[in-house]
Image (spheres, rainbow, N blue to C red):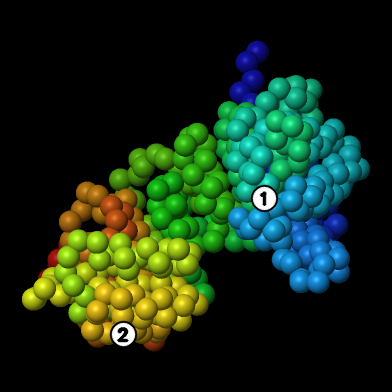
Amino acid sequence: MYIDMTLVVEKYGGTSVGTLKRIRSIADRIAVARTNGDQLVIVVSAMAGETDRLTDLANGILSQSSNDSKNIQYRDDESTKDNFRELDVLLATGEQVTISLLVLALQSLRIDAKSYTGGQIPIRTDSVHGKARILEIDPANVHSDLAEGRVVVIAGFQGVDDRGNITTLGRGGSDTTAVAMAAALNADECRIYTDVDGVYTADPRIVPTARRLEQITVEEMLELSSLGAKVLQTRAVEFAGKYQVPLRVLSSFEVGSGTLITNKVGNMEQPLIAGIAYNGDEAKLTIRGIPDQPGVASRIFGPISEAHINIDMIIQNVGLDDSTDLTFTVKRDEYAEARSILVEIAKELGAKDVVGDDTLAKVSIVGVGMRSHAGIASTMFDVLAKEGINIEMISTSEIKISVGIADQYLELAVRALHAAFGLDLVPSEDPLEPAAV
Ligand code: ASP
Ligand code: MG
């Protein structure tokens, strides 16, 4: 007889395993899931707050043993580099606690289960402590446990390098462990259980009519996460796209189907726009009257990037005489530093002046539908015009349009766009079709 078994990798984050009670209830859920015969691999994070607590311990010991209080941040900072190996040894213990507690909870329900640290699988990584990359996973141990009917519980966020050193994958890295395990095991689905019940068309705190998406493409999800939607670690989504792992985000507290993140765009009724992202902490800087000649942009942006300031949108005006203006946006907390660098550059270049505004917000619409539909940008600009919102900057990619606007209009803009693109819970008319009269 041929039995079609489903292999599912489930990942539970810090809040889902934050207390013994929650760990027990995860064990209860696993017991239920087991009754329909699925093979289950469970990846867990450290209990909520634990990774921060361990980091604080390390910083505490360092500040007591040296005069200057060092802060280990896994930066490319030579002075704390030797510490990184030891910090990984320390941080990896967080997940090790959870795997054993969960297996004990499962065993008390008479479920055969076994825990593995990253190194025991082994999940092989490079040697970059604090942000190691997974190179290779040997799934043989896990396969044989599953074949014997066991639930396998794996510590997220960690691996081992080729010299046996414990490594960690970067904060939030358990998502990546789960997706990588799912890829290595050729699992049918990877389910990330978290404290939200899926990916939404917009932040429900700002847009009360926001809807949970049944499905979103990997590309859209990557674009939304880079715009600040913090549902999954970006690396995990990239991994899922690369290895074609069907990835689902669901709530660990409520029952529901969550949101499926997939490479397949099969649904013809998929709305043109998947979601709207926003960021209320932007600022813009303009350097006016710079010579319009080769090399100027690089003289401006060189020093800015050396200061590790990220630039987002850029506009350069058409030069009327032999001079031009250049405007760009930065995050608000880097505005002051960017401004003072720019003032120096302005002097060197003989520019007229530097002006700025640190009350900017960015609103972006994201959707693969933009590839095949014209008119999305003009609809967006129309909606904003009707609300009397002035657009200060525009930037686009293949599947995204972002505008910079005054931050006082942020919520109004997001809500108006959400309604206009038919994303509200109550369906409204298609903005690209003229309304029937
Ligand atoms: N425990 C790690 C963190 O807090 C990894 C994770 O939760 O995904 O970042
Ligand atoms: Mg997490």
What is the residue that sits farthest to the front in this orientation? 348
Q: Is residue 9 visible?
A: no
Instruction: Give the quarter of the image for residue 231.
Output: bottom right
Name the spot of residue 118 as percent of width and height, x first.
74, 38
Name the spot of residue 224 as percent of width and height, x first.
43, 58
Name the spot of residue 75 as percent of width and height, x first.
62, 58
Q: Is residue 405 left or right of residue 210?
A: left
Query: Compared to 224, does 337 lie above or below?
Result: below
Instruction: Give the quarter of the image for residue 183.
Output: top right
Relative depth, front residue between 65 and 253: 65
Q: Which residue is mark 2?
A: 355
Looking at the image, is mark 2 or mark 1 nearer the viewer? Answer: 2
What is the residue that sits farthest to the top in this orientation? 1
Name the residue: 49% across, 44% down.
238
Query: Compared to 392, does 300 lie above or below?
Result: above
Helix, strand or loop at disc 1? loop
For disc 1, the neighbor class at 10 Å (few under 14, some 14 to 19, many from 20) is: many
Q: Amino acid at mark 2?
A: Val
Q: Amino acid at mark 1?
A: Gly
User: Which of the marked residues, 2 or 1, is nearer the chain's N terminus?
Assistant: 1
Q: Is residue 90 visible?
A: yes
Q: Is residue 305 left or right of residue 126?
A: left
Q: Which residue is mark 1?
A: 130
Quarter containing the N terminus? top right
Relative depth, front residue between 65 and 71: 65
- How many numbered callouts? 2
Which circle marks residue 199 in the picture? none
Query: Compared to 92, does 57 lie above or below?
Result: below
In three-dimensional space, the C-alpha distance between marks 2 and 1, rounded to whole angstroms, equals 39 Å
Name the residue: 60% across, 61% down.
196
